[in-house]
Image (tube, helix red, strand yellow):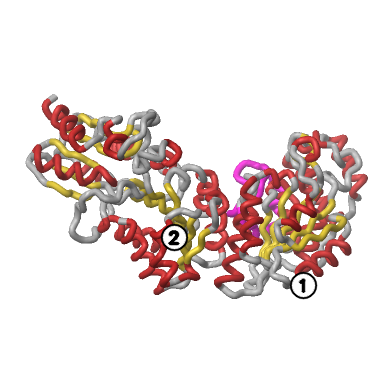
């Protein structure tokens, strides 16, 4: 996924000299193609995320189109106020990439883990928020973000999950990834989409990917009308992320009545023990097996 | 039209009294600096003009008055200051014509100005200069020092930082809260071309700035403008309670007498 990010940027940067990628000393080999192909359009600002956001705003003011790259634990989390004031208040065309979202850095510890980013950026005015699940959604979201004239946040989580789509997506509403006659639907975003698709097949229920979190699909209520049980899966806190976004949208159109809506996501606690990503996920009952069992239980309930 | 410091102070007094605004000393501290910048370098809405970033948003009233005197903003904005539905806030905001960045939260202006200077020099190959006015209390913010490192590393000699060195921050004297001295050595050791002058003397400001700007030695520039918080009003100068105090009828009259009603 990260390779695709780098390649898409190189393609765009070669076409338009105003694109520039900024990194706060993160990404290492990820940026090799950019450094090689368009060295003037890459800038490592040093370990200085807060001023990086300011530099991006300044570059935007003189006609550039900056992309800022960081780990989501730092961009947007650490520099939230800079994003609010320097980018959102003035609605600058800056694309923010927050990599390693969720529990990707399981072995490094809580400093590098990030399960709250969607909750906070969702509240910022003028911000569009994407959470792609595979290379196809990533490319589509990134190209869309680059073409928009407001700030956008792209959340990148666990990058080696199975690919879900077989081509780029054409609209940014919820994507039907498994169809069924069932009245149960799983809605998932980012790293949880592939497991949602697998479980949906096994249990013969429907599944959707949600690549764009803000603004939420305005046809959500209509698309989910026939379902009585919705199960929301995300590698993000159950407070303020996809689950909240869907509840809010359905409530807006008075479409909650007659529906059970259940959340499967990161619990509100820090991981104390070290281990693999799978181990870290197990602390929140979020391994692939956990998810299968939990969904099965909810359906039978 | 040359901007006149006494006229600017008078307008600030009027708007602050009508609007019951605090932060008068912060605005008075930078009057001469903005005078020189707008007399000499900055032409709002002029494509080829140098650029100005007011980072210390607390001095906004000085900039508002200058923008009105320059015809960028309508005079009514001063008369309606702080009324419901009026455009100008107590701290400078981006959506006001002539104001480049929102400056109320400290430590934002310099990173943005630095990004502008980098893009202009390194990518757009432009000769435009970027002036950024910050407060001394604002230098407590780490983001400024990140930008200072960056500006030196990338040899941004088109970045001119002006420090309103009035020796006060919100809760007290800089010296008592968080020491900045020795400032000149600090800036020099960070690779900046550093000059110091009387920040209330137009001639001194003009000459020092001209010399700094002319010097294309690949070093970013800093002008330490020696200023007095509340300059121009004896009862306000170096009295930090005025950071939080509004003028009443008596102090307003006293202020008018000292600044000159017909400035």
Residue nearer the viewer, A116 or A207: A116
Which mark is drawn over residue A30? none
Instruction: Quickly name the residue at label 2.
Output: A149
Figure check: B43 above or below A44: below
* Stretch in magenta: B73-101
Position of the C terminus of chain A, as image quadrant, is top left
Residue nearer the viewer, B47 or B83: B47
Which chain is home to disc 2? A
Tell me the SS state at disc 2. Answer: loop
Instruction: Quickly name the residue at label 1.
Output: B214
Label 2 packing within 10 angstroms: few (<14), some (14-19), many (20+): some
> In the displayed structure, does residue B122 sit left or right of residue B35?
left
- Asked if residue A291 lies in the magenta stretch, the reply is no
Which chain is home to disc 1? B
Q: CA distance from mark 1 to mark 2?
A: 37 Å
| Residue at 20 percent of width and 29 percent of height | A260
> In the displayed structure, does residue A272 sit left or right of residue B23?
left
| Residue at 77 percent of width and 38 percent of height | B243
| Residue at 20 percent of width and 61 percent of height | A167
* Residue B229 in the image, given as x and y percentages of width and height: 82, 44
Q: Main secondary structure of the magenta part?
A: loop
Label 1 packing within 10 angstroms: few (<14), some (14-19), many (20+): few
* Residue B67 in the image, given as x and y percentages of width and height: 71, 59
Q: Residue furthest top?
A: A301
| Residue at 18 percent of width and 35 percent of height | A289
Q: Nearer the viewer, mark 1 or mark 2?
A: 1
Figure check: A287 above or below A178: above
Q: Is residue A81 visible?
A: yes
């Amino acid at each position: 996924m990260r390779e695709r990010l780098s390649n898409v940027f190189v393609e765009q940067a070669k076409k338009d000299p105003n694109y520039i990628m900024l990194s706060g000393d993160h990404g290492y080999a990820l940026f090799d193609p950019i450094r090689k192909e368009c060295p003037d359009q890459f800038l490592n600002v040093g370990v200085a995320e807060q001023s990086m956001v300011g530099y991006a705003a300044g570059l935007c003011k003189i006609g550039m189109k900056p992309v800022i790259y960081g780990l989501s634990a730092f961009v947007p989390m650490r520099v939230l106020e800079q994003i609010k004031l320097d980018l959102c208040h003035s609605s600058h065309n800056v694309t923010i990439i927050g990599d390693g979202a969720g529990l990707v850095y399981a072995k490094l510890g809580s400093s590098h883990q990030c399960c709250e980013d969607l909750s906070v950026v969702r509240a910022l005015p003028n911000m569009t928020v994407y959470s792609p699940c595979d290379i196809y959604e990533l490319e589509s979201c990134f190209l869309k973000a680059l073409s928009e004239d407001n700030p956008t946040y792209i959340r990148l989580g666990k990058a080696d999950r199975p690919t879900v789509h077989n081509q780029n997506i054409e609209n940014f509403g919820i994507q039907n990834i498994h169809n069924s006659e069932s009245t149960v639907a799983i809605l998932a975003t980012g790293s949880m989409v592939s497991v949602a698709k697998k479980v949906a097949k096994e249990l013969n229920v429907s599944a959707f990917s949600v690549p764009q979190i803000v603004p939420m699909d305005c046809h959500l209520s209509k698309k989910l009308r026939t379902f009585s049980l919705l199960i929301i899966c995300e590698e993000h806190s159950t407070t303020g992320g996809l689950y909240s976004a869907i509840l809010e949208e359905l409530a807006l159109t008075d479409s909650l009545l007659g529906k059970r809506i259940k959340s499967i996501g990161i619990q509100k606690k820090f991981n104390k023990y070290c281990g693999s990503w799978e181990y870290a996920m197990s602390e929140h009952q979020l391994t692939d097996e956990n998810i299968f069992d939990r969904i099965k239980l909810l359906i039978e309930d | 039209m040359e901007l006149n410091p006494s006229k600017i102070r008078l307008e600030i007094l009027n708007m602050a009294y009508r609007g019951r605004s605090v932060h008068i000393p912060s605005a008075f501290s930078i009057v001469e600096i903005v005078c020189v910048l707008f007399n000499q370098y900055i032409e709002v809405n002029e494509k080829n003009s140098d650029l100005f970033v007011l980072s210390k948003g607390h001095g906004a009233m000085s900039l508002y008055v200058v923008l009105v005197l320059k015809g960028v903003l309508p005079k009514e904005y001063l008369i309606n200051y702080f009324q419901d539905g009026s455009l100008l806030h107590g701290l400078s905001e981006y959506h006001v014509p002539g104001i480049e960045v929102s400056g109320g939260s400290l430590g934002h202006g310099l990173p943005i100005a630095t990004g502008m200077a980098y893009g202009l020099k390194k990518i757009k190959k432009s000769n435009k200069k970027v002036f950024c006015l910050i407060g001394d209390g604002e230098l407590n913010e780490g983001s400024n020092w990140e930008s200072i490192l960056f500006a030196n590393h990338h040899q941004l000699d088109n970045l001119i930082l002006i420090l309103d060195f009035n020796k006060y921050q919100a809760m007290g004297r800089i010296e008592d809260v968080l020491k900045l001295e020795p400032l000149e050595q600090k800036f020099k050791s960070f690779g900046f071309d550093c000059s110091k002058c009387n920040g209330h003397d137009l001639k001194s400001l003009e000459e020092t700035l001209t010399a700094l700007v002319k010097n294309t030695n690949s070093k970013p520039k800093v002008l330490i403008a020696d200023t007095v918080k509340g300059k121009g009003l004896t009862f306000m100068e170096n009295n930090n309670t005025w950071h939080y105090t509004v003028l009443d009828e008596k102090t307003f009259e006293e202020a008018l007498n000292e600044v000159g009603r017909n400035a």
